[in-house]
């Protein structure tokens, strides 16, 4: 298949493109040209603004892709989705793969993600969250019309196959993952670690390699029509358990401090567990790698090797003083 990856030079793309080539697909990366990554150096690049690349008669249309992959970097909107759909229609692409997010589910609002304004005492959604769970019907708290995955998904149109992948919080060898929260504190010599409500939060996560494998598998196995699939790890740890795993990997002892959930200095601030079903991912797309323990080890080792490049957060500086 001829696969056009829109964006593709920051986080998901550098993992996915080599997997596409390994699966014997032909790939092109369409992006602004402002950032390059060695993992995508061996494929053709189309440079221009998003509007230019997707425009009628633009470079993507002329390349004649069979599949369009879009992570909607910089904002998921209905307008961007319509431009993608129009390009797919003109170029004759048979499939759109849109990388959305688990934030589309109403349960994520109930659990208080983003600004915490939507917390409910008794969430009605059973866990794990499957793809038939209710979607939110309001903008994401703290967000804006400039980024709304629900609106983006609803506006997709055109090809016979429209595949929407809904990842959890993506982690991997990259500086801006939530796991750096732990590594920064170890680097800065901070043993104290705040455990909101004893650290029992379970926050949906997924290894970036699993996202890449899901994209490749979707080309081969996604059903016809509009089809959504959670892209999540098959198991996870509570916040406290995750901290313990990181401590073991870095030979570090934490001094837990129990604080109220409302404490703002916490990257896993979920009032209720958020855990997605991976049944479709596992049984239909047949994606079962990587193992989360191995992926966590790779992430922490990479962050530790690059620890001097990570920012010194206000929180870690205050706790170290």
Image: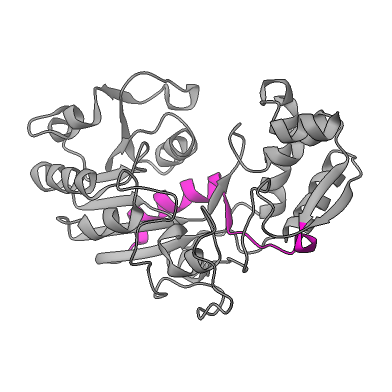
Asked which quadrant contains residue 7, the reply is top left
Asked which quadrant contains residue 84, the reply is top left
Closest to the observer, 161 or 99:
99
Closest to the observer, 297 or 34:
34
Where in the figure is residue 72, as x and y percent of width and height?
Answer: 34, 42
Above-or-below relation of 25 to 304: below
Where in the figure is residue 289, as x and y percent of width and height?
Answer: 58, 54
Residue drawn where x is 24% and y is 22% of the image: 48
Residue drawn where x is 66% and y is 26% of the image: 311
Using residue 132 as the reference point, say whether residue 153 is left or right of it: left
Q: Looking at the figure, which quarter contains the C terminus?
A: top right
Above-or-below relation of 303 to 219: above
Using residue 262 as the reference point, say whether residue 165 is left or right of it: left
Asked which quadrant contains residue 139, the reply is bottom left
Where in the figure is residue 153, as x and y percent of width and height?
Answer: 28, 57
What secondary structure prevails in the magenta region? helix
Closest to the observer, 192 or 231:
192
Q: Is residue 215 magenta?
A: yes
Above-or-below relation of 161 to 1: below
Q: Report the span colored magenta.
A: 196-222
Using residue 243 as the reference point, say whether residue 109 is left or right of it: left
Using residue 264 as the reference point, say whether residue 259 is left or right of it: right
Residue drawn where x is 74% and y is 60% of the image: 260
Q: How many marks?
A: 0
Closest to the observer, 221 or 132:
132
Q: Looking at the figure, which quarter contains the N terminus?
A: top left
Q: Is residue 254 magenta?
A: no
Where in the figure is residue 66, as x and y percent of width and height?
Answer: 21, 45
Colour scheme employed for the rendering of this structure = one colour
Residue drawn where x is 21% and y is 56% of the image: 155
């Amino acid at each position: 298949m001829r696969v056009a990856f829109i964006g593709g030079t920051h986080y998901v793309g550098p993992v996915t493109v080599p997997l596409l080539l390994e699966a014997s697909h032909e790939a092109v990366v369409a992006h602004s040209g402002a950032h390059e990554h060695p993992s995508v150096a061996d494929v053709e690049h189309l440079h221009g603004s998003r509007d230019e690349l997707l425009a009628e008669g633009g470079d993507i249309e002329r390349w004649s892709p069979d599949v369009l992959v879009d992570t909607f970097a910089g904002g998921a909107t209905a307008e961007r989705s319509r431009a993608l759909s129009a390009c797919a229609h003109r170029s004759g692409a048979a499939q759109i793969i849109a990388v959305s997010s688990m934030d589309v589910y109403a349960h994520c609002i109930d659990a208080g993600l983003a600004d915490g304004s939507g917390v409910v005492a008794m969430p009605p959604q059973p866990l794990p969250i499957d793809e038939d769970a209710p979607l939110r019907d309001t903008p994401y708290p703290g967000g804006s019309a400039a980024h709304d995955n629900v609106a983006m998904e609803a506006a997709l149109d055109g090809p016979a196959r429209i595949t929407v992948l809904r990842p959890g919080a993506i982690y991997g060898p990259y500086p801006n993952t939530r796991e750096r929260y732990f590594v920064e504190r170890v680097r800065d010599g901070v043993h104290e670690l705040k455990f909101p409500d004893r650290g029992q939060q379970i926050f949906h996560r997924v290894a970036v390699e699993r996202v890449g494998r899901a994209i490749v598998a979707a080309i081969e196995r996604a059903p016809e029509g509009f089809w959504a699939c959670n892209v999540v790890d098959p198991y996870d740890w509570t916040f406290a358990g995750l901290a313990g795993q990181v401590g073991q990997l870095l030979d570090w002892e934490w001094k837990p401090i129990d604080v109220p959930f409302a404490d703002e200095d916490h990257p896993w601030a979920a009032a209720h567990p958020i855990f997605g079903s991976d049944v479709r991912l596992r049984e239909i797309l047949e994606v079962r790698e990587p193992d989360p323990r191995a992926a966590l080890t790779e992430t922490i080792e990479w962050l530790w090797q690059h620890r001097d490049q990570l920012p010194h957060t206000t929180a870690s500086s205050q706790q170290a003083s």
